[in-house]
Amino acid sequence: MTFRDPLFFRLMQQFTGNEAGTGGLVTFKDSNWLLSVVLPHQPHFIDQPDDIRVCWGYGLFPNKPGNHVHKKMAECTGGEILTELCSHLRFDVHAPYILESAICIPCMMPYITSQFMPRSKGDRPPVVPRGSNNLAFIGQFCEIPEDVVFTVEYSVRSAQTAVYSLLKLDKKISPIYKGHHDMSVLLNSFKAMLK
């Protein structure tokens, strides 16, 4: 979504309490589409004009009718998807102006969240299979213990593992950030629960 006016971003920042680029996905658990949206840090693109804001979102159930726009998400225009989003956010009063100053281009990406499908140990191959001297798997569909898919770091780490292992290089792989052991993260989480 591209916005020529900062209104949507201002309203989202008031809704979440987070400046763009500091919060995670906002997921509407009651959305028939299981709609999510995120505001990345601005500018997001090189040479992005100061008065333009961009963000993205997705729905995991595009073949169900929306709660407010009673069509399948897969059959909706960008404006209809943005209308559904504004309705979940209760931005109804501002929706006409937001829609007038925005461009929302829907696209189907059927495999984008396939990493999150239920799985079992062994569904993904290790980066370098046991006994392999010239084959490795990189990207999102190999197994790196204790890491989380859907990040650039995961793909980089898999490539580092492959190259360093197969070429027998004595180099360290980028460490995995373990936020669940970071005391400041735990403290902030506890504070958020008390609000």
Image (cartoon, rainbow, N blue to C red):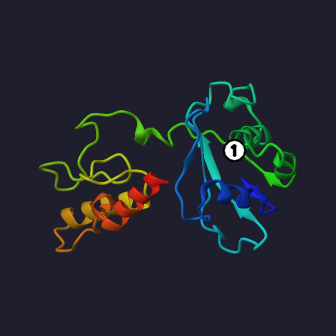
Up/down of 119 relative to 130, above or below: above
Up/down of 186 relative to 26, above or below: below
Query: Residue at position x 51%, y 43% from top?
Result: 112
Q: Amino acid at mark 1?
A: Leu
190 left or right, relative to 95: left
Query: Residue at position x 67%, y 58% from top?
Result: 14
121 left or right, relative to 185: left
The residue nearer to you, when weighing 101 against 45, is 101
Query: Residue at position x 27%, y 48% from top?
Result: 143
Q: Could you say where residue 67 lies in the image, as x and y percent from the top left? A: 69, 28
Label 1: few (<14), some or many (≥20) within 10 Å? few
Up/down of 161 relative to 171, above or below: above
* Residue located farthest toward the front when viewing the structure as drawn: 194
Residue on which disc 1 sits: 89
Q: Could you say where residue 45 lies in the image, as x and y percent from the top left? A: 65, 68
The residue nearer to you, when weighing 166 against 108, is 108
Up/down of 188 relative to 120, above or below: below
Q: Could you say where residue 90 lies in the image, as x and y percent from the top left? A: 73, 43
The residue nearer to you, when weighing 163 against 126, is 126
Tag 1 secondary structure: helix
The residue nearer to you, when weighing 118 against 15, is 15
185 left or right, relative to 113: left
The quadrant holding residue 28 is top right
For the image shown, how many numbered marks are present on the structure? Answer: 1
